[in-house]
Amino acid sequence: MKRYIIGLIFLLGCGATIDSSIAPNTKPLRNYNKIYVNIVNSSGAISMSTISSAELGMGSQHLMQGDNQTKQALESFQFELMKIGFQFVGQKSEADAFVEFTIGQIRYDPITGWIADQATARIHNSKNGQIIAYFKTEPRFITPTVKTLVEKLSTEIMKKY
């Protein structure tokens, strides 16, 4: 029974909750179909994982950098937005809306993989710069994975689409 409770806490804790606030603009997001997405702020930490055995007299260390994970998080976010129905354009000036994507410091956890504290998506009207929608994730109990943050943001955006 104890294992099941610990497992349940782990599953619930690894997620992220999301707060969303929509600016006074009443148009649904589908009216801003052509979008331009850029990453505004993020950093990748250098994480070190150590495995050692005193019995065998062996040890191993792995250094992992989170910078490349930032690019992968952006690509995953763009992919999720494409699944919703958004079309991407190459220039900000061609877009109906632009999205500013941020993700907290990405680091490696040997148990759960790549994690980050939070992620945000601010969607702006390209014509006047007004914020159409703002989505922000927050960790629950345990720091969520980067994949979870991206999925939570895109799921909430899909609800407003």
Image: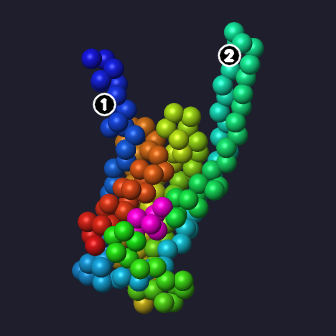
Q: Where residue 23 sits: x, y (%)?
A: 31, 74
Q: Amino acid at mark 1?
A: Leu
Horizontal side of 114 relative to 99 (left or right) equals: right
Q: Where residue 8 sits: x, y (%)?
A: 31, 30
Q: Is residue 52 above or below residue 90?
A: above
Q: Which mark is residue 109?
A: none
Quadrant of the drawing holding the N terminus: top left
Q: Nearer the viewer, mark 2 or mark 1?
A: 2
Highlighted magenta segment, given as a residue range:
76-81
Q: Where residue 121 sits: x, y (%)?
A: 43, 66
Q: Secondary structure at mark 1?
A: helix
Cα distance in 3D space between marks 2 and 1: 31 Å
Q: State the residue at coordinates (40%, 69%).
A: 81
Going from N to C along the chain, the mark reached first, 2 or 1, is 1
Question: Which residue in the protein does label 1 denote?
Answer: 8
Q: State the residue at coordinates (57%, 51%).
A: 105
Dominant SS in magenta: helix
Choose between 132 and 2: the one closer to the eye. Answer: 2
Question: Which residue in the protein does label 2 denote?
Answer: 53
Quadrant of the drawing holding the C terminus: bottom left
